[in-house]
Image: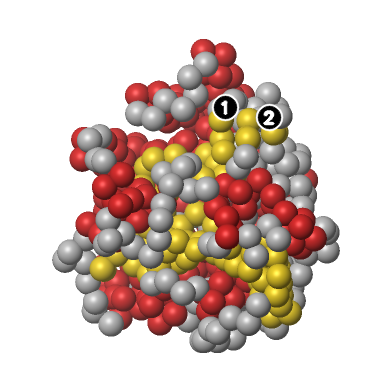
Amino acid sequence: MFNNSGISMFVEVYLTLILFYAILIMTSYLFLAYLSARELNDYLKKNSFVNYEVLLSSEFAPYLSLIAPAYNEGLTIEENVKSLLSLNYNNYQVIVINDGSKDNSMEILINTYDLIPVVLEYQNKIATKEIKEIYQSKNSAFKKLIVVDKENGGKADALNVGINIAQNPYVVCIDVDCILDKDALLKLAKPFLESTRKRVIATGGVIRIANQCIIKDGRLIEVNIPDKMLPRIQVLEYLRAFLLGRMAWERLDGLLLISGAFGAFDKEVALMAGGYNTKTVGEDMELVVRMRRSMHEKKIPYTVSYIPDPLCWTEAPESFNIFKKQRSRWMRGTIETLWIHRKMFLNPKYKLLGLLSVPYWTFFEFLAPFIEVIGLLITLLFIAFGILNWHFFILLLLFVYFFAVMFSILALLSEELTFHKYIKVNDFIKLLVGALVEPIYFHPLAVYAALVGYMEKIRGTKGWGEMTRKGFQKKP
């Protein structure tokens, strides 16, 4: 048993470690926010007078293949494909992969776009599930569209089919439930043209929440903040992640993740890396890490780019059950990626990637929920036994709460001073209310979902789980 001096020493060491971890994570957030602000300012100065119409008419504009996997997307697939076909870009094709849907997705596609079976030559460089049929439209208005009907194999397998079939040197992987900004491809393609010293192997853009926004003919015509608190707070979460996080990692050239909802890849490098890993549910992050690792090991100069413009709008979960499935899957994907590439952890061979990016994700993304829960339980135990003063605990909670609120407000102000997509005063107020509520409502839910992800990984849970969607609001 511990004596009093032993208990006191243990408590002192414990409090020191907890405070050190809290200060470290908060400092890292502020440092990343500072770097993001610098990068965002530079980007806006550089691109404020860019005439994207010049790129649109340029013979040097990169040729792109959009790959959109679809599984049970009947509620939104018509609007989504319309959105993809009406983008402001010339040199691209759209490849929709029906991944063994059980709903009427395929029927809607065939009827809406006048599809007929065709024989299309392609190289099967990545092993995938069997393709049942390949369709193209007999209507010249939809000549850019290819639809592939295949056996169910999961999102990664569907994306690999798209990479095999893609006829262009760059592939753009997108969730079919997303709505793209009309100039999204112009902005996404620009980094591939600009880089001269380093090869751009991937580029991604900002994802925004489309819940309660108005969609017409595949276009976002009215931006609204969700009335429901869960998707509303996810608007704030995405602002923080994309405006105050990924911009900083792009500046450091240490970005590990391009959102699976919308990202472009050099097809040759993606094939060299082996395509998407079908054995992980975090295939988007894992591919980026594997591509970067491959380029490091081959000692080829490269970079991963990032576009801060709001290019893609997607539907966020509105129910806790769907939210839990999404976030537990994200955690499983993070664990799997970090484990697959554990060789990179603190390995100077991979430079900043191994010495900073991977350790950051390990300590502040993977381990953070676990450390938070264990720390909270131990602190409450100390209070119950009179070892720790509860006043200290309350002060610590208040400090964390106000930091979280202020950081969300910082993200909101960054949005207001830059892209200003939420123009209504009422929307701004809704987001402020969300910032006040988030630490006591949303954060515990997110931590719980992460813990579920831990347990699912331990039990060997596979697959995505059903992700039921409500569908977009359409304007007549």
Residue visible at 59% across and 76% down in the picture: 161
Relative to 185, is 345 above or below?
below
Q: Where residue 308 sits: x, y (%)?
A: 37, 42
Tag nearer the camera, 2 or 1: 2
Seen in the image, is 164 located left or right of residue 114? left
Which element carries disc 2, helix, strand or loop?
loop
Q: Where residue 74 sits: x, y (%)?
A: 77, 53
When asked about the image quadrant of residue 430, the answer is top right
Q: How is the image coloured?
A: secondary structure
Q: Where residue 265 sits: x, y (%)?
A: 41, 66
Task: Work out whether residue 461 can be spotted.
Answer: yes
Residue 466's tag is: none
Write down the residue under mark 2.
475
Question: Given the image, on which type of amino acid does mark 1 rest?
Answer: Glu
Residue visible at 53% across and 83% down in the picture: 122
Seen in the image, is 350 located left or right of residue 405? left
Residue visible at 63% across and 35% down in the picture: 216
Residue 222's tag is: 1
Q: CA distance from mark 2 to mark 1?
A: 10 Å
Compare marks 2 and 1 and give the one earlier in the sequence.
1
Relative to 332, is 77 above or below?
above
In the picture as drawn, the residue positioned furthest to the left comes out as 197
